[in-house]
Image: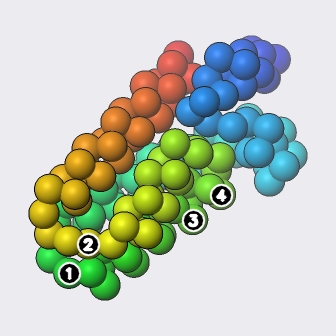
Amino acid sequence: MHNQQQTRHDASRHGADVIDFDHLDQYTLGDADLQGELLRLFSIQLENQLAELSACADAGAWKQASHTLKGAARAVGVWQVADVAERLETAGFDGGAGDARDLEDLRKARDAFVVELARLAG
């Protein structure tokens, strides 16, 4: 357990721009195992929402998917993803180049999260 706690605290210092463990601590009472599970579940949801956004053909589905992702990312303290999802939600669906740029930004935020999650796993 000490190694998990130390890893989490190291991640908090070095990966704070990707995952906010201070925020996550508030909801998990510092339980590193629970945090790991929540982050793994968020990773699955992130992939699902990204796929849904990539396949969107209308503004309603776009808004729902981006709003859902924004809330989930905020809940676990993954601010980069939350910020991009908020931008997607606010900008709305246009079916063109703007959506493609926004989705690329979301993929970059996702990639940073996935790298950090892999680093935490060890």
Total tally of numbered discs in the picture? 4
The kind of residue tagged 3 is Gly
The kind of residue tagged 1 is Asp
Mark pair 2, 3: CA separation? 18 Å
Sequence order check: which comes first, mark 4 or mark 2? 4
Q: Position of residue 23 (x, y in %)?
A: 77, 45
The kind of residue tagged 2 is Phe
Q: Position of residue 6 (x, y in %)?
A: 77, 16
Instruction: From the image, tell me which residue sits under label 2.
Output: 93
Q: Can you say whether 73 is above or below 52 in the image?
A: above
Marks 2 and 1: in contact by CB < 8 Å? yes
Question: Can you tell which mark lies on residue 71?
Answer: 3
Residue occupying image coordinates x 34% and y 36%: 108
Crowd class of label 3 (few under 14; some 14 to 19; many from 20; radius 10 Å): some
Q: Can you say whether 48 is above or below 18 in the image?
A: below
Of tags 1 and 2, the one toward the viewer is 2
The kind of residue tagged 4 is Ala
Of tags 1 and 4, the one toward the viewer is 1
Sequence order check: which comes first, mark 3 or mark 1? 1
Mark pair 3, 4: CA separation? 6 Å
Sequence order check: which comes first, mark 1 or mark 4? 1
Question: Can you tell which mark lies on residue 58?
Answer: 1
Instruction: From the image, tell me which residue sits under label 4.
Output: 75
Query: Dot 2 lies on which element?
Result: loop
Sequence order check: which comes first, mark 1 or mark 2? 1
Marks 4 and 3: in contact by CB < 8 Å? yes
Crowd class of label 1 (few under 14; some 14 to 19; many from 20; radius 10 Å): few
Residue occupying image coordinates x 50% and y 26%: 116
